[in-house]
Amino acid sequence: MDSAENKRILVGMGEIAVSHNPHTLSCIGLGSCIGVALYDKINHIGGLAHIMLPDSEDAAYKTDKPLKYANLGIDAMLKELQKIDRGLRHENITAKIAGGAHMFPSIDSSSSMDIGKRNAECVRNKFKELGIRLIAEDTGGTHGRTIDFDLTTGIVYVYIHQHEVIRL
């Protein structure tokens, strides 16, 4: 997928990145974390967030990485996308998400300790609040994921250990 024209940008835990084509944005090692891909197919711009926790309002303390929270990371990513395209409209943006696994099977998956499930729910609620359409997702399960988000095509490639590649 990488070539001289297509540059890869790695998005670490609690970080966001925005760019335009021809770039690929990547998150490695998503367990309970969620990779949030936002895409404007008209202008071929997009962003990727590596969300670690559901909501900063639930946090007992403030963090040095505020973008690790779904509510703050998605808002920050939209602001950065607006710097690339000042005419950016939420109705032109689509979202795809991957991750949110239940990584600790010894913990009851219905409990509030299922961070992956809570992350996915918070991200979906944030999209509803903002009027952004979620068009594809690969969430849940008990396996980690790595994703590549191709800003030329808008395709998110989900790599799951010892499984086939999923295209969202």
Image (tube, helix red, strand yellow):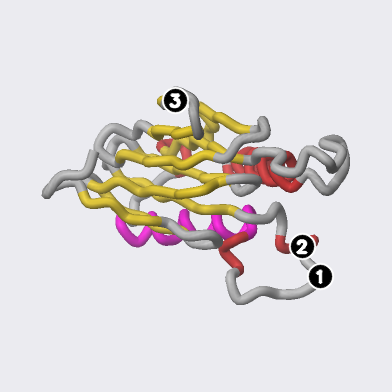
- Rendering coords of residue 139 (x, y %): 61, 33
Residue mark closest to the camera, 1 vs 2: 1
Q: Which residues are magenta?
A: 69-84
Q: Nearer the viewer, residue 102 or 21?
A: 102
Q: Which residue is mark 3?
A: 166
Disc 3 element: strand
The answer to whether residue 76 shows anywhere in this view is no
First-in-chain label (2 vs 3): 2
Q: Which mark is residue 57?
A: 2
Q: Amino acid at mark 1?
A: Ala
User: In the rendered image, which residue does mark 1 sit on?
Assistant: 60
Q: Position of residue 162 (x, y in %)?
A: 49, 28
- Residue 54, position in %: x, y? 70, 52
Image position of 109 with respect to 46: above or below: above
Is 71 inside the magenta-drawn segment? yes
Badge 2 element: helix
Q: Position of residue 91 (x, y in %)?
A: 46, 37
Q: Answer whether labels 1 and 2 touch (C-beta < 8 Å).
A: no
Circle 2: is it few (<14), some (14-19), or many (20+) Cα within 10 Å? few
Horizontally, residue 66 falls left or right of residue 166, namely right
Q: Are marks 2 and 3 in contact (CB under 8 Å)?
A: no
Q: Is residue 131 left or right of residue 46?
A: right
Question: What residue type is disc 2 on?
Answer: Glu
Relative height, residue 43 to residue 137 (above, below): below
**For residue 124: magenta?**
no
Dot 3 crowding, Cα within 10 Å, few <14, some 14–19, many 20+: few
- Find the distance from the CA under tag 1 to the CA under tag 3: 36 Å
